[in-house]
Amino acid sequence: MSNFNIKKLLFLLMIGGCFLSLSSCKKNSSEGTPVITQIRAIAPAPNDSILKKAGPGEWVVIQGANLETATQIFFNGYPATFNSALFSGNNLVVLIPGDMPFATLKPDELNTIKVVTPTGTVVYTFPIVPPPPVILAMSNEYAVAGTKISITGSNFFYIDKVIFPGGITASTGIVSNTSGTQLELTVPAGITTGGTIQVVNRYGTGTSLLLFNDFTTGVMQNYDNVNNYDWGAGNSNSSTAYPGNRGTYGVMKAAGVGGGDFGWWNGDRSLNVKSVQWVASANLSKPLGNYALKFEINITKPWKNGSLMILKDYNWNFVARLEGWKKPDGTSADFTTTGWQTVTVPLSSFKTKANGQDGTGDPAGSMAALLGSGSGGLNVFFVNAGTTTVTVFEAAMDNFRVVKIAN
């Protein structure tokens, strides 16, 4: 809600308060001890009503008396920032902090609102709870039993359990970070089916869009039960070279690749899959960002430079460019993975050529512009678009699939 609208609402609340109690409007709010009588929603009718609970990131109106000179406001014992221009003697318009670290809050201060003024302090009991967990990603969507994984998302506080496909549950050894955006646990034994996962805490249950241990949905190549491999890099099923593997996988290799060398067809520098379905024709009208190419990768030797270019049908019009060694701030660092790791490449990451650099321009205007009829070959090339020689590159890859990542 804009500050203009908030101020308008505050004015109306003040006027309403005057009609209800003319004497209180005339009284100097700083003369008495602060009082909280109720918490209201800030949104216009029909939601402008008395609240029974609220959560982080919500605007609320604290109502009562002698509030205008508030110097501190706490939710669950956590301080809120505020604009005193939105205060009156009877109303405080304030945003509940969205970054509230529930994992470190004091238990005896949960579900309280505290307002401090020069003339006193008032503590009001009111449920302040986060929404149910939200699951965004998993470090390895094909992790085998006994593997430690991380799940990213939000509201990962007071976790009771994580439910895997088939109802297999993990309820011990779950560790969340203080911001509630990541949790770590070990994959339990006994998972034999694929599907969504669920994170359950005291506030509710979050169900993933991602699919764990699913060898069917959107799979175009996994070297085992779905094998459309055409030519290029060799393959292996060694669990010594790359532990935690799921059967057979491909291994791309390159060595001594000089600057500007785009000879992806040499040696094991490409992985090429026959024409397969990327997206069903019925879904070609959906936004590009709703779908992604996913695969698992395992890199044990430091990746220092060079690029993985992903194309459809050998067509360089739209390229997804992966450079794990390149950090978001533009600097670089040797890149390896801790075992197998899921890579997510939104279809909106397939981009045109800009300033002489493949895959750095604009995404396709539509799903159909990128995929045509929805079918085609998949090509993964290793090239050196830089000037420094690539001494060595080696990466195991598996489980190529196109799946939904947003509704």
Image: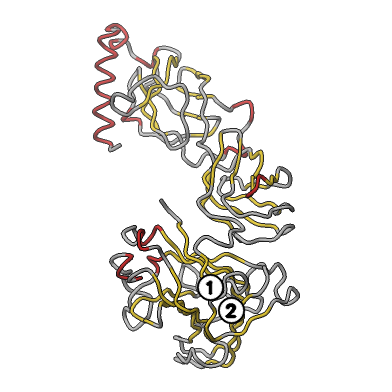
Q: Quadrant of residue 295?
A: bottom right
Residue for point 58% across, 56% down: 138
Residue for point 43% across, 64% down: 346
Left or right of 316, for residue 273: right
The quadrant of the picture occupied by the N terminus is top left
Residue hosting label 1: 324
**Up-down: is 381 above or below 278?**
below
Q: Amino acid at mark 1?
A: Gly
Left or right of 29, for residue 323: right
**Up-down: is 138 above or below 134?**
below
- Whole-angstrom CA distance, mark 2 to mark 1, is 7 Å
Q: Tag 1 or tag 2, which sits nearer the N-term?
A: 2
Residue hosting label 2: 303
Residue 221 horizontal/vertical position (percent)? 54, 72
Q: Nearer the viewer, residue 266 or 94?
A: 266
Which mark is drawn over residue 206?
none
Left or right of 275, for residue 12: left
Q: Quadrant of residue 81?
A: top left
- Secondary element under disc 1, as helix, strand or loop, is loop
Q: Nearer the viewer, residue 330 or 340?
A: 340
Left or right of 11, for residue 97: right
Q: Nearer the viewer, residue 13 or 152?
A: 152
Q: Are marks 2 and 1 in contact (CB under 8 Å)?
A: yes
Number of numbered discs on residues? 2
Residue for point 70% across, 76% down: 237
